[in-house]
Amino acid sequence: MNNSHQQPILEVNNATVYRGDNKVMDHFSLAINQLEHTAIVGPNGSGKSTLIQLLTHQLHPLAPKDGKPVIRVFGEHRWKVSELRKRIGIVSADLEYEIVHNLKKGYLTGREVVMSGFFSSMQLFEHYDTTDEMREKAAQALEKIESTYLADRILNQMSAGEKRRVLIARALVTNPDMLILDEPTTALDFVARQNCLKLIQDIAQEGTTVIIVTHHVSEVIPEIQKVILLRDGRAAYSGPKQEVLTSEVVSSVFDHPVTITEFGETYRVEMDL
């Protein structure tokens, strides 16, 4: 699909971000159109986590001298964070860690985790006004990913793969326009990893714009059209995956010689010794 005529649903223009005295993002730019499924790939320390926190307003860029907006999401640069989070679903191992370590009374069911997505919180507090409609949508989100059996199961009694599926349902419960997956297969075994990637493929095919942020080239699923390679807080390369995912380009970003092999529409990386 050619989306070049559309306004980007996510746009970052020359973003510079500091953590204390350290510059962690340096004039970073990207533009992603609707249904332009994208992988943002880079080694540890390249700026992937900073980018996630920038998009969720946990970090803020330096104010530009020209006064132009640095970040536009769905064409707008001013958002109420709670409203923005309903339109962007986020799944990450860090989020899983935070939820597990903020369990109400020591437990939380799969259904409750999914429903917490309506409030962008780590748990369901007693003062939250939950509704039958929310419970129905939570059930639908679990059904969509074939995980209804996890609705009444306690989160800390689930396998790593089951927890990840519940977090994906949580991200989908508000029917977001964009789904951002940060290192989606971290800590998963081989079977759970393959199941997770297949689930992400299904979501991409059903009309949600998918953005995968990872340091694993093997997580670039067939539906991915664009790849952005990060290095030192900058977008070192950006373009169609066939042009970006070459041995020469990836080797230069990771500072180590590698061989990229394409199998159909998937990729394998081997380190050259």
Image (cartoon, rainbow, N blue to C red):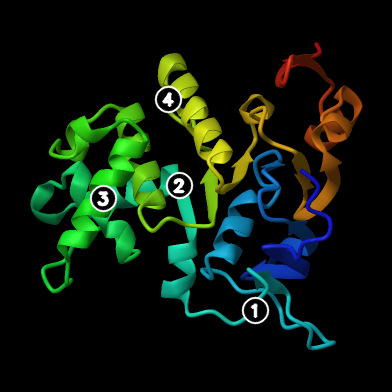
- Above or below, 182 against 261 in this view is below
> What's the distance in space between the residues labelled 1 and 4, CA to CA?
36 Å
Circle number at residue 77:
1
Q: What is the distance, in whole Å, between disc 4 and disc 2 at their CAs? A: 14 Å
Q: SS of the residue at dot 2?
A: strand
Looking at the rendered structure, the secondary structure element under dot 1 is: loop
Q: Mark 3 near mark 1, Cβ–Cβ under 8 Å? A: no
Residue at 81%, 13% (x, y): give it: 272
Which element is circle 3 on?
helix
Compared with residue 11, is residue 219 higher up or lower down, i.e. above or below?
above
Instruction: Describe residue 165's horizontal placement relative to residue 254 as left or right.
Output: left
Distance from the alpha carbon under mark 4 to that under mark 3 = 24 Å
Q: CB under 8 Å between callouts 4 and 3? A: no
Label 2 or label 1, whichever comes before in sequence order: 1
If you read the primary sequence from the N terminus, does the residue marked by circle 3 or circle 1 appear first?
A: 1
Tell me the amino acid under the disc marked 2.
Answer: Val
Which one is earlier in the sequence, the residue at label 4 or at label 2? 2
The three-letter amino acid code for the residue at tag 3 is Ala
Identified at 47% across, 54% down, the residue is 89
Q: Residue at x 66, y 47 (%)?
A: 45
Amino acid type at circle 1 is His
Which disc is residue 138 wearing?
Answer: 3
Closer to the chain start, of discs 1 and 4, is 1
Residue 61 location, quadrant: bottom right
Mark-to-mark CA distance, 3 and 1 = 30 Å
Tell me if mark 4 has few (under 14), some (14-19) or many (20+) residues whose alpha carbon lies within 10 angstroms of its own. Answer: some
